């Protein structure tokens, strides 16, 4: 199976399945002498792990990261870093009823047709559980970026049609405190309360709902990204769209920019504190595929979780019509756990491009 690695210079390869013994990641290309804070890595995994609240899946996993190599006396050595995350709370019997059935809007049918075999327990390799490995790798990428003065912040900005107002992103530390003070992980407290009530009502109805995550990156130097195929926003888009349930990505003004005139949309250059900046940021911090020194801003849209607690029509392997019932433990809305996956993938893209940028110097 191809497609298990991501990145060029800062490169990761993930492995494992939802109901296997463990999942994990190999990180190749992390620079040496980076302080590896294991407590920070675990805190990042804790934000993604299941069973956090009434609006997430009740599967219980500690997601305890075990660093097997590449770290000595708290510092990266420059050699491959291997991290293992054991699976602890698999309930494979919850999936026995779908062994020969295709769940609507899942990878069951396409996976079976492509490989001729599939692990139906939780989706196997196609399960979102794989993203825990990305979060562990992303935590190390964050530690590297923080040493370079780069900050990443994401929050849940919409659930269904319920949207948070635009935030003042001057103080990302304060926004992080607000985000972590509520289970919706929205940095606007009033909207967070509405989101929690909405998601809980959807859960009780046996249904699911989608949402959006907004991301801000501060401190990125001018020059990350390439002007043709490896545009920075293209790599960010690929990273976001590789996350389970993501159906949309837009940066800067996004789709609303198509409704504007050039005279409105152009970001005018100005001098601020002896640095070139732009008066507006419709470009989202990226112009011509290359970072321009402004905050990088983008949004990621997640579809409703495909497993619902209702009977649905489907087909089995033989092509016969049948009914499938939703069972097991699933998220009614995935965005509150997905924010840390979005941040992790952002960090992996930026760490890779930062190392590529340094290679020019």
Image (cartoon, rainbow, N blue to C red):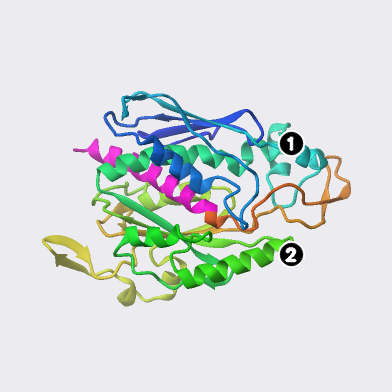
Instruction: Kindly report the secondary structure that dominates the magenta region of the rendered protein.
Output: helix
Residue 123 percent location from the top left of the image: 68, 40
Q: Secondary structure at mark 1?
A: helix
Residue plotted at (35% across, 39% down)? 352
Residue plotted at (76% across, 40% down)? 95
Of residue 89 and residue 232, the one placed in the foreground of this image is 89
Span of residues in magenta: 337-361
Of residue 341 and residue 266, the one placed in the foreground of this image is 341
Instruction: Name the residue carrying label 1.
Output: 92
Residue 254 percent location from the top left of the image: 43, 65
Tell me the CA gap for discs 1 and 2.
25 Å
Mark 1: few, some, or many residues within 10 Å (few <14, many ≥20)? some
Q: Is residue 91 above or below residue 216?
A: above
Q: Secondary structure at mark 2?
A: loop
Of residue 344 and residue 41, the one placed in the foreground of this image is 41
Q: Is residue 348 magenta?
A: yes
Residue plotted at (37% across, 76% down)? 261
Residue 302 percent location from the top left of the image: 56, 57
């Amino acid at each position: 199976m191809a497609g298990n690695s991501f990145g060029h210079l800062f490169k990761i390869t993930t492995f494992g399945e939802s109901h296997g013994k463990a999942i994990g990641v190999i990180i190749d290309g992390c620079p040496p002498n980076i302080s590896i804070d294991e407590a920070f890595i675990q805190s990042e995994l804790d934000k993604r792990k299941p069973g956090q609240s009434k609006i997430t899946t009740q599967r219980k996993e500690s997601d305890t990261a075990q660093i097997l190599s590449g770290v000595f006396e708290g510092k990266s050595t420059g050699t491959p870093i291997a991290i293992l995350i054991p699976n602890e709370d698999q309930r494979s019997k919850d999936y026995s009823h779908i062994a020969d059935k295709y769940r609507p809007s899942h990878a069951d049918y396409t996976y079976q047709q492509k490989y001729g075999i599939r692990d139906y327990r939780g989706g196997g390799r196609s399960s979102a559980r794989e993203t825990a490995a990305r979060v562990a790798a992303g935590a190390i990428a964050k530690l590297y970026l923080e040493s370079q003065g780069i900050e990443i912040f994401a929050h849940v900005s919409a659930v269904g049609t319920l949207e948070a107002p635009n935030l003042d992103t001057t103080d990302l530390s304060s926004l992080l405190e607000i985000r972590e003070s509520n289970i919706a992980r929205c940095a606007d407290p009033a909207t967070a309360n509405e989101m929690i009530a909405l998601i809980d009502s959807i859960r009780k109805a046996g249904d699911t709902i989608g949402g959006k995550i907004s991301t801000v990156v501060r401190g990125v130097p001018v020059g990350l990204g390439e002007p043709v195929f490896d545009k920075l926003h293209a790599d960010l888009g690929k990273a976001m769209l590789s996350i389970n349930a993501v159906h949309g990505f837009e940066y800067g003004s996004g789709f609303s920019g198509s409704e504007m005139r050039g005279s409105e949309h152009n970001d005018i250059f100005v001098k601020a504190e002896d640095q070139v900046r732009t008066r507006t940021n419709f470009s989202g911090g990226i112009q011509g595929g290359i970072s321009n020194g402004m905050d990088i801003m983008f949004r990621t849209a997640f579809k409703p979780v495909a497993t619902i607690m209702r009977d649905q029509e489907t087909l089995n392997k033989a092509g016969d019509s049948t009914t499938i019932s939703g069972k097991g433990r699933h998220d009614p809305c995935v965005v509150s756990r997905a924010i840390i996956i979005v941040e992790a993938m952002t960090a992996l893209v930026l760490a890779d491009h930062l190392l590529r940028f340094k290679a020019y110097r």
